[in-house]
Amino acid sequence: MPPGADASSLAAAVLDAATPLAAAAATSRVLDYLARHAADHPRAFFADAFPSLLYRLFVSSPSSASFIDLAAADPALTDLLLSLLAPSGPLLAAAAAADRLALIRFVFPNERLPDWLRLALASPASASASASPLLSARVGSDLHLSIFEYYLFWFAYYPVSAASPPAAPANPGLRSRSRLETWVSTLATTAIRKPGHKPDSSLYLKLLYAYLTHFVPTRTPMARTGGAGTLLHRTANDGVDALDSFARAEFLLHTLVQFWLVGDDFSPLPVQACHALGLRLPPRAHAELSERPPSPVLGDAVKLLVMYLNCCDGRALVDVDARMPSEGLPVWNGVVDKVGFWNPLIQRPLYRFVLRTFLFCPIGAAIKNATQIFSVWVAYMEPWKITQQELDGYAKQQTGEEQDLQNCNMVYTSSWKIYVLSNYLFYSSMVMHFLGFAHKFIHSDVAAVLLMVYKVLGVLSSSPELLDLLHKVDAAYHTTPVASSLPYDDVLKYVPSICEQLKDWEDGLSETDADGSFLHEHWNSDLRLFSYDENGAYNLLQLLLIRAESEILRLSGDTQQALQTLDSIKSLMKRVFQGQIERIHGNTSLEELHNQHQQQVRGEVFTPKHPSSGKSSWADVKYRGEWMKRPISDSEVAWLARILIRLSDWLNDALGLDCGDVDGSPAAASTTYIRFDRNELNTVGGPKDAARMALVALCSVIVLAGQALLKFMRSHRVKIDLRVFASKKLLSAAVVLYGVVTVTRNASG
């Protein structure tokens, strides 16, 4: 049989495989085909069978799951897929051979690209050429990818598709150069894994770890040439093979970062980079982000990527310490080069990825998904705990609690000082955002939230040297020194870089646009981790513990574990805050301040699950955001509350209630006066004229009353809040009243 006919038959068999047994048989046929045609560069396979294979590997439809998902229930299929898709396996070997001859190019469906990449492709080529190495394959408004690159795009898209809504059908005219490209693009838009479905990711994580270890070098070069993690600026002495190797590593990492971390971020690049490149990306509506929960698949994959890259940088850091002194190292953006080769590539995307999760995770979403992203953040803050043995556990699928036992004794050392300084916002600003997330979800799963708080405080207090460094940077950030002998003088040079990062990394993100955010818009415009006023982390933690105690009392069943976690958090707070409290408040202990605070806030009944019902003056005072946009509670109808909030916003804006009334304002200048003409009063022509005048007078009085009411509301900053009508009790009473009226009317009729 000719190779072309054989490849077409193979494509049909792959597409029809809907069970683990059929998928295993189809995979065996692919392995056999590649073995028979390994020497003759099977162009027919990549033209006919390869797109079908990718579709069945990574895309699930309502009628059949993907091969990756089917492998969870069939160890034999898992072994076959590992043999086929391994870095040195027959599929990627054949792809490398075909790419060397440039046999075929593919176009990835534009509707499956991250939003900002699609916008960049729609912009002039001169503006987007330097925005990302992925755009170097641009031809017109499409990306023309090699076989290897095309495979990596679909591999990276697999975990993202679990949280992505089905896209609109692609326009075939944009990809009409070949029947194959149009078929793949159209096919990919018709079937995707159901949102929220999490398949077993064992096989996927094994493949990811295999690709990272094979394509990404574990020991990086000493010198950095661009400061942005790019690998293409290599010397001629490295040779063609080394250049190709680093190019593959760069493409793999940038693909994973763009699909996983950047994704649909409305600020995908540093603000200065966007201005320099001339890219004008329209901001994405925050409301759309707020309704998209974290992907149930993505967290584990991102955690493995972060751990692997940090482990690579850790090895390079050890090499630097062994071969050269710390003085005189080149400085990049205010950060010494010892931070690592890969870290600048993921700093900003990862920070915004975690922050978007904390800000926009909607009320009612599964907190388990957010917990996975939380674990990524914690792993990033503790790179010194990552060991090669732990990473090798991914090849055996040893994750979770089993890995925690291996690195519990590894702590921060001074060799990681530059890493902490260059990533200081992860240890300070992100903690503040996390506390807002914890307040928002404390009523959903108090045990899970308390455990997360315990882990964060555990990281901050894990080493006295780390805690001292964090305090030093905070003091340097908030103080303008007049002498050079201050105790934090050695970290002052990093403050400008941290200020720049804070402004750039949080570009466009605001707590007031988040669904149910606890924090106020300006709470984290400055670093507040070690601030002891009402806006600081210490007071937020105190309030959280009080709310947690109230929630634990409401729980049924065994609450011993939650209470123990609560006590552990109080102990960790002593380590993190006690030294600073004694410095600011003299010998006052943390317990005394905590007791004073409890006496102040417990004068009223505090019901955190129902902040809008009953007397809750403490909550009214302590909630720092706009009260109308407070977290949606269990006593409200969530969808109706969101509609009423938007309607209230529109009315307040239309009536000018968003700002106070001042003298000389247009509202004050447009006051209406009622004037009566004595001649008209004396010449009333009859009842009709009298009724008309009475109606005009009545309307004028109503207008006057309305203007007076609006002026009073503006001057006293009173706004319309229709959210009260979303109360379940009020709606229930209305339904009961309607039922009573209906029954009475029917009985009387």
Image (cartoon, rainbow, N blue to C red):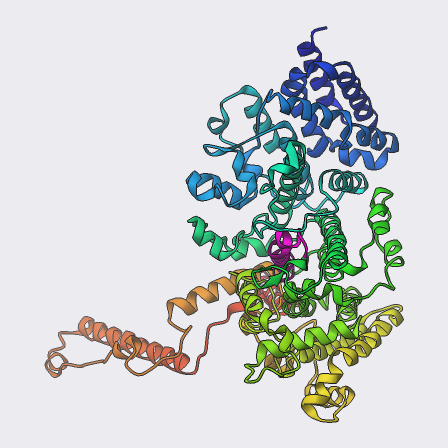
Dominant secondary-structure state across the stretch colored magenta: helix
Return the residue nearer the eye: 213 or 599. Answer: 213
**On the image, which quarter does residue 359 sit in?**
bottom right
Which span is picked out in magenta? 340-362
Is residue 420 depicted above or below 195 in this figure?
below
Can residue 191 be seen here? no
| Residue 410 location (% of width, % of height) | 84, 63
Which residue is more in the foreground, 594 or 86? 86
* Position of residue 324 in the picture relative to residue 696 (left or right): right
Which of the 4 image quadrants contains residue 57? Answer: top right
At 44% across and 79% down in the image, what residue appears?
717
Task: Inspect the magenta stretch and tell me whether residue 341 lies in it.
Answer: yes
Q: Nearer the viewer, residue 704 or 347?
A: 347
Q: Quadrant where the C terminus lies?
A: bottom right
Q: Residue at coordinates 53% horizontally, 56% vertically from top-left?
A: 287
Residue 11: give x, y in percent of width and height: 69, 19
Q: In which quadrant of the rendered image does the N terminus lie?
A: top right
